[in-house]
Amino acid sequence: MLWYAKASDDGANVIFVAVNMDPTVEHDSTVTVPIEPLGIAPSESYRMHELLSDRAYDWRGPRGYVRLFPNESPAQIFRLER
């Protein structure tokens, strides 16, 4: 699984992308969100809006769980919302 981020210069828009690099098998992983540089406290919750499915998840702390299925959702694109 590939996990990476891209942010606007002012940090107002932060996008995270998870990609399953295996076209035949589902993969899951705990991913890390660099919350400290984003000004998010470890006890503070934040929303990860998955743009392809239009689902939102409330995460807390620097770790989140992602599961990708090659035939259904080989990638997820998250926008961090506070």
Image (spheres, rainbow, N blue to C red):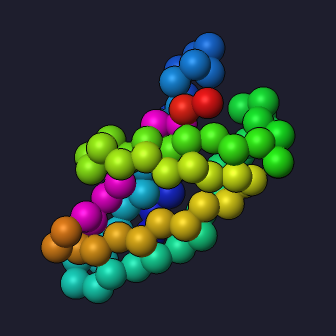
Q: Is residue 35 visible?
A: yes
Q: Does residue 8 lie above or below 70 as drawn? A: above
Q: Is residue 12 above or below residue 71?
A: above
Q: Position of residue 9 (x, y in %)?
A: 58, 16
- Quarter of the image where the N terminus is located: bottom left
In magenta segment, residue 77 = yes
Which residue of the protein is positioned furthest toward the left in this rendering?
A: 71
Residue ranking furthest to the bottom = 25
Position of residue 50 measured from the top left corner of the image (x, y, whole percent): 38, 46
Measured as percent of width and height from the top left, residue 59 is found at 62, 52
Seen in the picture, residue 75 relative to 9 is either above or below; the reply is below
**Residue at 42 percent of width and 71 percent of height:** 67
Is residue 78 visible in the rendered structure shown here? no
Give the dominant element type of the magenta stretch: helix, strand or loop. Answer: strand
**Which residue sits at x=35%, y=54%?**
76
- Relative placement, left or right, of 80 versus 21 is right
Query: 55 left or right of 57?
Result: left
Q: Position of residue 11 (x, y in %)?
A: 62, 21
Front residue of this view, candidates 74 and 2: 74
Q: Is residue 46 magenta?
A: no
Q: Which residues are magenta?
A: 73-80
Q: Residue at x 76, y 36 (%)?
A: 40
Q: Is residue 33 left or right of residue 44?
A: left
Q: How many callouts does the rendering have?
A: 0
Task: Say which residue appears at 69% left-offset and 44% top-offset.
Answer: 45
Q: Quadrant of the C terminus?
A: top right
**Would residue 33 appear left or right of 77 to someone viewing this image?**
right
